[in-house]
Amino acid sequence: MSATVNSAATPARQPRGYNFAFLDENTKREIRRKLLKAVAIPGYQVPFASPELPIARGWGTGGLQITMAIIGPEDVLKVIDQGCDGSVNAVNIRNLLVKTTGVDTTFDTTAASIVQTRHRVPEEPMRADQILVLQVPIPEPLRYVEASEAKTREMHGEMDYSRMWVYLYENIVQYGEISIGARYPSLVNRRYLMDPSPIPRWDVPKLSMSPTLHLFGAGREKRIYAVPPHTLVEPLEFEDFRFRVEEFSGRSCLRCGATDTYMNELFDRVSGQKLYACSDSGYCDKRRAAQERRAD
Amino acid sequence: MAVEQEIVLTVRNLSKLYGPGCPDCLSLTGPEAGTNICPRCHTIVACNGVSFELESGEILGIVGESGSGKSTLVRCLYFDEDATSGECCFSAFGDGRANAFAQTSQARRYIRNHLLGIVYQNPLMGIKPHFTAGGNVAEKLLTADVYNVSAIRQRAAALLERTEVPLARMDDFPAHFSGGMQQRVQIAKALANNPPVLLLDEVTTGLDVSVQARVLDLIKEIQQDLGIAMLVVSHDLGVIRILADRTAVMQHGQVLEFGLTDQILEDPQHRYTQLLVHSTL
Amino acid sequence: MGYVAVSGGSEAIANAEELLTFYRLKGGASPIEVRQIREQMRLAVDKVMSEGALYAPTIAAIALKQAEGDNIEASFILRAYRATQPRRYYSLPADTGKMRVIRRISAAFQDVPGGQILGPTRDYTQRLVDFSLLEESPETVRAFFDRIGVQTSRSDQLPDSFPKIIDLLRREGLLVEPVDRKETLFDITRESISFPCQRSAKLQSLARGETGVMMALAYSSMRGFGDIHPYLGELRVGTVPLCINHPAKEQPVYIGRVLVTEAEIISEYYEDEQGKPKLTLGYGLCFGHNELKAIAMGVLDRTMQSRSPHKSPAEDEEFVLYHIDGIESSGFSAHWKLPHYVTFQSTLDRLRRTQQLREEATASECNREQRRDPGKTAPGL
């Protein structure tokens, strides 16, 4: 089963009067400049103009602008939302990109050159020749403790993260553990505190020292940041209260049987029983296909 | 008998101006001019060439009426305000020769987090009412790179006990505490990183007289137990008398008289000091 | 098995879009003409142009038709369209003293040079439902025009320009002087704003803000969260000429007129730079005829100049400027409709763990009588 869809075979209707990948070349160049700056200062939030797109603010316009700025006709694109290629928002974003670029798309992480994602890092390890573009709603990790942008920029400038630490301390005092689910504040390259976008804690370690370039785009908040390849990403933790990923021990995917993936909790429509399935649908499908081949 | 005292903090010619400033600001203001406002450009000269040395383990008092520049001095030393000119050297930073005022904001933050503690007149300037009492102490420890929750809680408990904050309230929010208790939480926080220098700005002003006495006792005890050098700023000669070994009298931004506290209280040299001493006796 | 993977998204999306068209037309009335919207939904078109930040009445009317009258959605369509248009020129500063007014009032003085021009306003209409509109027809319209005597442009009778009321106050030294900030013009569509914010960036953000939220913020200040008691120095509605510098021409080139609403808000006096107390000014200007927005903008421009150390929401420029854009706030507010399964799963993981720790702590507390040990008050510590 080949998941790669060749757009050339089914030529997409190019909307009249729009540039390749929608944005005009000047805007793209400007975004690429900001991307270079973001890569040069890992974890630092670079402000950018962030023009409006025909997709609503908060629906992935940051990630979309990055993808539009870096994509070329030879690229193979994968778009996921919640780990799933078929989610309506992923479909919508993929449609816009295909409509304006005509690139090939895929559901297979290993076959993609660019993966744009919301809330997940794919389960399969990514390579140096791939780029992961993450959609970010709130780029500022310090927003937990400070509402003002002017103040948080100053705190980053002075590497003043004590209030974030106190927040974690108070969490432990109140609940016995750090209660942050997704959006776990992490230190990049021992310098900048970063919001890794609302990926689950499960995915945070995948960002660290990975061979892949990770680009983060927050369209509404007009910020770009990056975790370059082979860069340290350390979730904040105390010596006696370590960072922990989500617990799925004893669970297995009802579709592919995996026991080592991030799972969605489901309820059987008939029995109301709780079930689990891989959140990364592409990976799950691939495992199932392999199992079927073995069965034949 | 004479032991060479180590100097922990040296301040030279510290000036702080609010306003455009002109070449004559410093010479046209001060006690002799009888004003701290420059007649030429209307700049307020809050501090005018203040110099002193703080010895390890001593309490240095700074007394003056409101507007004398004493609180501005403390704020400049804690980097809440940028000094306009002058130098400030900590023995524990840059071989004691680097001018702290000239450092980057990151380096100044290091000095503030590791070498200084401050207690403001208003406890809510120094502590955050929406952090627990323990969390406030923890903040100072976390800025000084202690990342162990058990260690933080033990140290916080010890400090709060030392400053007589009931331990049952350690995980409560200071917003609900009395002014005196808030002040003691602030003192516990200021002591958390074992700073060689503690700045105290009108710490008893605004507290009930009975509470004042307990806070003063506490400060004196802490100084004796821990040997922290303190800079105590007050308009109240009573506070200075109880706490300070040496005292500087400030007026209109300048130091008028400087010496052993007993000497200044018993034999004030300057007319203004005499007035100050006699009015309180 | 009850689980169905979310799939077929493409088809569902296409169907949903068709359904929108179906819902718009299923009533069976003849399709509304864009021209009808442009001319008869005048204020809706103006609001869309102002919040969409593009002066294009016909496109705004199309957007309103496409969005079935949803003002924010229509503004979004216009704004997205605008983002694709090249930026060739910046207009030269427009002189609103040269405005050809259709309406002009001052609440500060009874008698103003040039007079109060009420113009088209609903201010003094009783808000009674006009049932006669049910029967409005070409005949009734003709009868109306016959009755008032058709005048295509009443403004012909008015002078070409009016003196500005704030200039009268300035001449007497009662009002702050404009400050030449020597700033280069900030373009909020080219750069992201930072704080403290340049005034040109503030005014641009306000000019394309969402009317409702601006009104709410301004209202909070006039009502008590702040200290603004505004006087409406002058409110004018009318067209102003716009010019650009063209590289091929020596003189500025006139490119046309735009309808704008301008409000000048006079407020509490402050000492100016020379220490002299003077009245302060807030400035509002937006595309189209939108008086509430212009007034709210003028008030907010003034609240953000507040010198109070304790800033109320309307006085905090970050609070105001980050929250008034209707395209941004509506997009983010609506994005909660997107799936959040992954993050919710992560939250549930934490909650279950916390509950488990609580139960363990309670159980062990029941087991042994213990004094409160401050180092160990928290569950699990």
Image: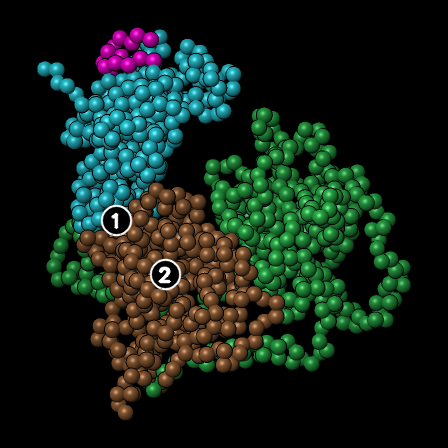
Chain colours: A brown, B cyan, C green
The amino acid at mark 1 is: Asp
Q: Left of C121 or right of it: where is C208?
A: left
- Is residue A109 at least partly visible in the picture? yes
User: Which chain does the residue under circle 1 lie in?
Assistant: B
User: Residue at point 29% right, 64% down?
Assistant: A206
In the image, the segment drawn in magenta is B256-270
Q: What residue appears at the point 50 percent right and 54 percent down from the top-left corner?
A: A30
Per the image, is A16 magenta? no
Q: Quadrant of the N terminus of chain B?
A: top left
Residue drawn where x is 30% and y is 62% of the image: A211
Residue A69 at x, y percent in the picture: 48, 61
Marks 2 and 1 close (CB-CB < 8 Å): no
Look at discs 2 and 1 and give the one toward the viewer.
2
Marks 2 and 1, Cα distance to the nearest angstrom?
Answer: 40 Å
Return the mark for residue B171.
1
Query: Which structural element holds mark 2?
Result: strand
**Residue C205 position (above or below residue B60):** below
Where residue B95 appears, as percent x and y from the top left, is 22, 28
Q: Which residue is mark 2?
A: A214
Q: Is residue B260 above or below residue C319?
A: above
For the residue pair B221 and C262, the one nearer the viewer reads as: C262
